[in-house]
Image (tube, rainbow, N blue to C red):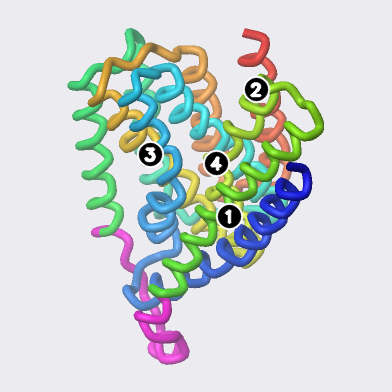
Amino acid sequence: MLILGVAYFLLGLILLYFGSDWFVLGGERIAKQFNVSNFVIGATVMAIGTSLPEILTSAYAAYMHAPGISIGNAIGSCICNIGLVLGVSAIISPIIVDKKLMKDVLFYLLFVIFTAIIGIDGFSQIDGIVLLIIFIMYLRWTIKNGNVEVGEEEKKDNPSLVFSLVLLIIGLVGVLVGAELFVDGAKKIALALNIPDKIIGFTLVAFGTSLPELMVSLAAAKRKLGGMVLGNVIGSNIADIGGALAIGSLFMHLPPENIQMTILAIMSFLLYLFAKFRKIDRWHGVLFLALYITAIALLRMG
């Protein structure tokens, strides 16, 4: 089992590395083809693509009458996206926030606060429908208002749309399959080393669904595409709430997670506060990462 685990782990790592790079490259080229900003591509195509594991996990958990896993996965992933994904990305490369993006950041903060308020007593089917409608409206509004000017020379140098789409799709498949193999391999290694199931579940499973966002954002940060990183984080969180949590609540009533929602609201407010200064700096990234580790420790003790 140990040898098989190592093989899965390494293969997953390779797929994650190359897949995330191709996914970001394809997304950047498509943004130029359609004259939309990197933020818009990050907040729509990439956010939905990388959020698929959370959406499917939460929906399936609710369908199987495991409401705690359904809502815990959705809200936990949002916390992970700000604390770990945005935190590490900002440490690698500080993120410059365009003034035009502040409306999106403010919308995201208000969406989180609204979700926290309606979820005080848990989430009903009506709540789920409302959150899903808001999510769809946000996607439409983001795409409609995301046009940017792209020079003719830049467009001419850009590969064809078909090639960019193929690159995007292959990259996404590589990221999703790579994440599955990476986590599965890590589980096999942990079991072979007699690490308890409780620790495996709390660390690897929780981390696994946010791995696509992390790898894609790191690849974007490496290319100095701060707008795409911010778009992926904000878009993924809106997709986790308006997609994963909302769809999960359509299957059954989801219990309240007020502590997790409070942590998410605080981190979201800090994100908005830092973005107002037009730059999410390295020390902001360190703070987000420290808050994430503290939140995990508190939730673990609870």
Question: What residue is drawn where x is 63% and y is 24%?
Answer: 202
User: Residue 104: image x %, image y %?
Assistant: 38, 45
N-terminal label among 3 and 1: 3
User: Residue 26: image x %, image y %?
Assistant: 46, 71
Mark 2 lies on residue: 296
Residue 217 drawn above or below residue 147: above
- Mark 2 is surrounded, within 10 Å at the Cα level, by few (under 14), some (14 to 19) or many (20 or more) other residues, namely some
Q: Is residue 297 left or right of residue 147?
A: right
Which residues are the magenta region? Answer: 144-164
**Is label 2 in a helix, a strand or a loop?**
helix
User: Residue 182: image x %, image y %?
Assistant: 64, 48
Question: What residue is drawn where x is 20% and y is 29%?
Answer: 130
Instruction: Measure how far apart labels 1 and 2 are at the Cα level.
Output: 25 Å
Mark 4 lies on residue: 210
N-terminal label among 4 and 3: 3
> Which image quadrant for residue 93?
bottom right
Instruction: Measure how far apart labels 3 and 2 are at the Cα level.
Output: 23 Å
Q: Quadrant of the C terminus?
A: top right
Residues under numbered marks 4 and 3 in contact, where contact means CB atoms less than 8 Å apart: no
- Comparing 270 with 20, the one in front is 20
Please say whether residue 156 is one of the residues in the magenta stretch: yes
Amino acid, disc 1 = Gly
N-terminal label among 1 and 2: 1
Q: Quadrant of the N terminus?
A: top right
Mark 1 lies on residue: 178
Amino acid, disc 2 = Ile
N-terminal label among 4 and 2: 4
